[in-house]
Image (spheres, rainbow, N blue to C red):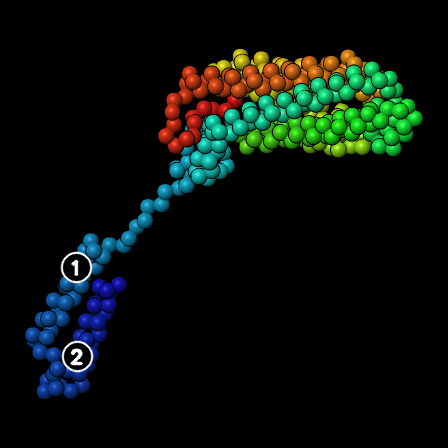
Amino acid sequence: KNSRTAVYSSTFIITIASAQVQLCGPFHMILDEAGMRQISEDIEQAEEYEESPPESCMPLTIESVPLSTEIDDNPERKRPYLPSCYNVYDKIKGSIHLAFLSHLCFILASLFYLKLALVTLNWYLCTKRRGVPQDILDEDTEEVWTSWTSENGADYIFDKWEAYRLEYELFYIMGALFFVFVGLLDLIRYFDCLNMVLVLAGVAGMISALSKTYQARTIWDFVSVHMFFIEAINLLLRKHDYEGVACFRVGDVCFLIGAVLDCIGSYVGIAEHEGLWVIQMDVFSCCLWLFSALTDITAEIYYLRKRVGGSSDGIGTVQCY
């Protein structure tokens, strides 16, 4: 642009000078031979400048790198996220803290469910020794129990019933709540929507614990145990990507057997044919779930001791199963 401006300026000056010479004659000539020579040199320099400009005036070029080249080309990690999301996902997926927190919640939930089954078994045996009829046992209203204990002179049974009801609600809610935590932690670790089934199972269990009628409690129990059964199927179908798979498979099978036993108990409850054997089966099912939780955390510790060394940043490199 500067070279063209210099050429046009020189040409304009020459044109004006020629016009003045023609109009005013030789006596009014403005440009002498030295001036004309200088103008000619300026024109030649401008032409050379236009043909080969110096490097300092070269146009700036910016090399653009596509965003796709920054993303890992590993086909196993191609997801519609930005590179920062890859790093977050990898850290969450390989987090030892989340893995052990999930196992701990699983153990606590199984312990609360086992305690619930033992409390129910103790209450059932106590009422059968005192001759409490089954239709009274199925009632959760204070009026029915107050009326029956007053008629039979068994006020101490009413006190035990109140204590049992409080323990039943407490242990059931705590166990179901920890299963909700397990489902949420697994959802964060695996990014698998099927883990929401475990969350729904825990929510249904808490609703069952707060239900005031036998029918509502039985229905919500039915929903909860079948959700646990679906979660057990999901665990068996899940692919493990590191050693210790056999230990995890043993735990998954135990969890599945316990869920099947709970489903059988729910069908018996809907049919209103509950008995001692149903409660004993529930205790055995909870023992299987506790064994499954202990097996999972044992396999996790075994893998870490064998494969994973110390990590400077506190984040492990174990791949979640």
**Disc 2 marks which amino acid?**
Ala
Secondary structure under the numbered disc 1 in the rendered image: helix
Can I make out residue 204 in this image? Answer: no
Q: Which of 71 and 161 is in front in this view?
A: 161
Which residue is pictured at 41% across the width and 41% down the height? 67
Badge 2 vs badge 1, beta-carbon distance below 8 Å: no
* Corner quadrant of residue 20: bottom left
> Where is residue 170 shown, x and y percent of the image?
69, 30
Front residue of this view, candidates 144 and 2: 144
10 Å crowding of disc 1: few (<14), some (14-19), many (20+): few
- Residue 295, given in percent of the width and then of the height, sits at 55, 16
Q: Mark 2 and mark 1: span between their CA atoms?
A: 24 Å
Residue 224 seen in the current view: yes
> Label 1 amino acid?
Glu
Judge depth for marks 2 and 1 and give the one in front: 1
Q: Earlier in the sequence, mark 2 or mark 1?
A: 2
Residue 147, by quadrant, is: top right
Is 50 located above or below residue 301 in the figure? below
Q: In this view, does 144 lie above or below 272?
A: below
Q: Which mark is residue 296?
A: none
Say which residue appears at 77% left-offset and 12% top-offset: 277
In the picture of the structure, the residue carrying the numbered disc 1 is: 48
Residue 118: image x %, image y %? 71, 19
Direction from residue 272 to residue 234 in the image, left or right: left
In this view, the residue in front, 96 or 159, is 159
| Mark 2 Cα-neighbour bin, 10 Å: few <14, some 14–19, many ≥20 | some
Name the mark on residue 17: 2
